[in-house]
Image (cartoon, rainbow, N blue to C red):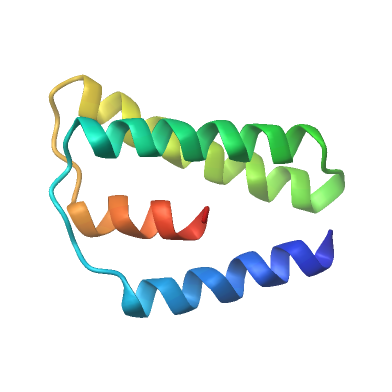
Amino acid sequence: MKTFVRSLVLGCAVLSVVGNAGAADTRDVASLEDSRNQLAWEANNARGVDKLQLKEEEQRLQDMIDTLNGGGRVDPSEVDRALNRTR
């Protein structure tokens, strides 16, 4: 599991540098929901600190989804970073 977390962090760093900002729309909400579901699955199968980190990331995604569904604005670069962290 430590290898997974390290890979996730490394992947996030690389994708953050390469990623580009896009508009937050329904595709972003759907992508965020898919990512949140993936994190929820991983968190349910993890233990200890890894589980806590995955749950925190899942909550950040849920907060973005709630904001977008409520008509609020989320910085497109934050959406991209969140999606890149979970891929």
How many numbered marks appear? 0
Residue 20 on image: x %, y %:
22, 68
Could you tell whether 33 is left or right of 67 in the image? right
Residue 27, position as x, y percentages in the image: 25, 35
29 above or below 5?
A: above
Residue 40 location, quadrant: top right
Determine the image quadrant of residue 65.
top left
Residue occupying the point 86% across, 44% down? 47
Above or below, comparing residue 81 to residue 68 in the picture: below
* Observer able to see residue 59: no
In the orientation shown, which residue stands out farthest toward the front? 27
Left or right: where 86 falls relative to 52: left
- Give me the residue at 14% from left, 30% from top: 72
Q: Return the x and y of residue 10 as percentages of the image width and height.
A: 59, 76
For the point 61% across and 40% down, which residue is it?
39
Quick one: which residue is furthest to the top in this view? 70
Q: Quadrant of the N terminus?
A: bottom right
Q: Is residue 44 above or below residue 39?
A: above
